Amino acid sequence: MPDEKKPVSGDPKKPASEHVSAPELPAEDEWEAEAGPAEGEEEEQTEAEPEADKFRPEAIAARIDAIGEETESDRIARAEEKKLLDRKRQQKKKGKRGLESAASKRLAKIGEGHVKRPSAAAEAISPEADSLLESAARARNWMGQHRGVFAGLVAVAVLGAGGFFGWMYWQDRRNEDASAALAKAFADEHGHVSEKADDEDDDDSRAKPLYPTFKSAGDRREAALAKYRAVESKYSGTGAAILARLSEGALLLDSGDAKGAIAAYDEVRTSPLAQADPEVRGRAMEGRGFAHELLAQSDGAGAEKHRDDALAAYKELQTVDMPGMKELGMYHEARVLIAKGDKARATDLLKEVHKLVGEPAGGHRFSYLEFVVEDRLRELDPNALPPKPKPGTGGGGPGGKVDSDNPQIQELMRQMQEKARQKGGAPQ
């Protein structure tokens, strides 16, 4: 059946040949592009319809009704927000209670104790600062808090210091006066014995002698004893008084008062000066031995006891820590042993003493010991030492022999040695 062509819409007056030609078809790859806009337009139209529906009265009324309703998700979100808000409120309440508690404690302490006012010195000292500065700061604070007590302490300290220095000054002046008085007594003890007094000398050109002159040895001894005793009574407790007592013992021994001499020597031997000065202690021990020897000569019944006491004193003398004291004590011990009849032991002691004092480097203080020891040894054992050369002159007594066994001779030797020491030092 032949195809019937449908009439083409258009102007019917135009010829049919103009309406028969169809438009050319696009390429296949352009079909979709051309179809796209049509589909999009359809979608826009479908979306525009709901948008338009929102503004209809029915839609508006439905939304108003749904405002008071709550969905499940809204309920969960609201519950979480409430929990979070509660936790924040609890934390704020706790922090506030801690601050309020601390503030309450501080307010309660106000007025209970002393309030330390800040000071520049206290702030400048840190805990790591020097301990001396910290102590100074504490002392300063204490002084500021106890002004009355501090002022009293200062006054007491000033008075105490003044009294101490005043006492020291008085002691120095007292010791000086005591030393001057002791020197006068010593001058009298070593004065000259002459029938002519010093004021009777017509020669004015001669210098006044250092030591006074006495008419007899007894007058000289009595004058010296009086001055020594004056020093002891007026300046009791001083070193000069102790030395005066020691010299008094020697003068009493010289006068034959052995018991009085022993009392004086014992007092000196136990004095503080004797404990500090070995020479003073040694002289007191030696003098005590001399006094007991003198008693042995006068007391026949108790002679042996007094010799034993003398031996004890001389053995104690050997323990004095001073050069020469040991040799001196050994020599005196040998003398007492000879008096007791123990010549063998006395000879051994004298040989030992001779060896000690004969050493060139011995440096002993008592140089006369060498000569008296040799005399004693030759008496006991003539073969103990080489023969003694004959001196040109005799010395000391009949036949040139010195009676070194006499305690008074020993005391005179000691005094001579003391004079030599005062003039030019200890003899070597």
Image (tube, rainbow, N blue to C red):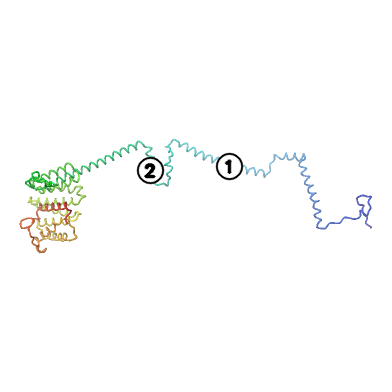
Which secondary structure, mark 2?
A: helix
Q: Quadrant of the C terminus?
A: bottom left
At 43% from the left and 41% from the top, the residue drawn is 120
Q: Amino acid at mark 1?
A: Lys
Percent position of residue 62, x then y: 74, 40
Percent position of residue 12, x then y: 93, 50
| Left-right relation of 167 to 213 | right
Residue 371 against residue 51 in the figure, above or below: below
Q: Nearer the viewer, residue 197 or 242?
A: 197
Instruction: Work out which residue is located at the far front of the displayed protein and give it.
Output: 205
Among the two numbered marks 1 and 2 on one chain, the one whose residue lies closer to the N terminus: 1
Residue located beneath label 1 in the image: 88
- Where residue 315 sits, quadrant-wise, is bottom left
| Left-right relation of 338 to 150 | left
Q: Nearer the viewer, mark 1 or mark 2?
A: 2
Which secondary structure, mark 1?
A: helix
At 30% from the left and 39% from the top, the residue drawn is 158
Q: Nearer the viewer, residue 135 or 345?
A: 135
Query: How many numbered marks are there?
Result: 2
Q: Nearer the viewer, residue 21 or 84?
A: 21
Q: Amino acid at mark 2?
A: Ala
Residue located beneath label 2 in the image: 136
Residue count near mark 2 (Cα–Cα under 10 Å), binned few <14, some 14–19, many ≥20: few
Q: Quadrant of the N terminus?
A: bottom right
Percent position of residue 330, x then y: 15, 57
Residue count near mark 1 (Cα–Cα under 10 Å), binned few <14, some 14–19, many ≥20: few
Instruction: Work out which residue is located at the far left of the displayed protein and give it.
Output: 398
Instruction: Give me the C-alpha separation between circle 1 and circle 2.
Output: 53 Å
Q: Nearer the viewer, residue 48 or 144?
A: 144
| Left-right relation of 135 to 363 | right
